[in-house]
Amino acid sequence: MTIALSVNLNKIALIRNSREGDYPSVVAHAETCIAAGAHGITVHPRPDQRHIRPDDVRALAALCRQKAGIEFNVEGNPFAPAKGSYPGFIPLVLETRPDQCTLVPDSDDQLTSDHGFDLKSSGDKLRPVIAQLRDAGMRVSLFMDPDIEQISLAKDVGADRIELYTGPFAWAAQQQSADLPALLQAHKDAAQHALDIGLGINAGHDLNLDNLPLYREVPGLQEVSIGHALTVDSIAMGMANAVRKYRVCLAGT
């Protein structure tokens, strides 16, 4: 099974936002990624607009609709409210209708997403949101830790997929930690459980060319979302070459 590569463009927007104007262009870099073989584009618009802005989401939604077979994934906190020109997360995704909406339990004071949902506390609140998004034609994925009990709850609240949070795995791989085999096994077990109960499997956070060959062992993996590492690699090799390298790495060839 082909593991789809969705390129997260947040860091391109972060660089752009350090100056006035539209340089570098998020849309132009999305076009480069798609031309080089990316299967999709991911963005994570936050209320503070530190990187991706609402107009980026609108422009990328229009671009991806023009590209046959290219999926657009918008991720974020489903309870993020309107703030200035940010219309609120759910109104923005209902307006732009991405192929996939990945719900993430982050907040403005987090540097980046760093944990999955605790559905024992948030499941009842999420259930109608998930139903609303699915009724609007979106696939819904929940950002989750590799916790089998929590993944069962993801199925119960109506999710189509989970996105396994790979931050601790990636850190253990970088440090060559003795914990790495156990962490990888936890992800394998979580993914197999997700498969067994009918959930699709995505993954993301600090995956890169060094740790992906190991993470490919996770059963049923359908999609990875990669932004930070791919953007860093693009500095050395160019974005088109980086996308091609990640495609080869995911294919295991």
Image (cartoon, grey):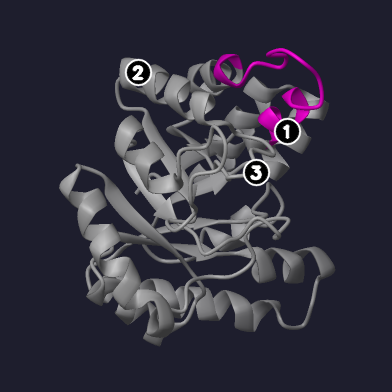
- Inspect this view and state whether residue 118 appears: yes
**Residue 133 vs residue 9: left or right?**
left
- Callout 1 secondary element: helix
Residue drawn at x 34%, y 44% is 100
- Callout 2 secondary element: loop
Q: Looking at the picture, how far across and down is residue 53, in whole percent?
A: 57, 31
Residue highlighted by disc 2: 67
**Residue 84 vs residue 237: left or right?**
left
Residue 85's quadrant in the figure?
top right
Q: Are marks 3 and 2 in contact (CB under 8 Å)?
A: no
Q: Earlier in the sequence, mark 1 or mark 3?
A: 1
- The segment highlighted magenta reads 11-28
Give how far apart the Cα atoms at labels 1 and 3 are: 12 Å
Give how far apart the Cα atoms at labels 2 and 1 are: 25 Å
Residue drawn at x 72%, y 14% is 23
Q: Looking at the picture, how far across and down is residue 63, in whole percent?
A: 41, 17
Residue highlighted by disc 3: 48
Numbered circles on residues, count:
3
**Amino acid on which disc 3 is placed:** Asp
- Of residue 252 and residue 233, the one placed in the foreground of this image is 233
* 17 is within the stretch colored magenta: yes
- Inspect this view and state whether residue 253 appears: no
**Residue 186 vs residue 126: left or right?**
right
- From this viewpoint, which residue is outermost toward the left? 135
* 58 is within the stretch colored magenta: no
**Residue 97 vs residue 29: left or right?**
left
Q: Earlier in the sequence, mark 2 or mark 1?
A: 1
- Of residue 87 and residue 32, the one placed in the foreground of this image is 87
Residue highlighted by disc 1: 14
- Callout 3 secondary element: loop
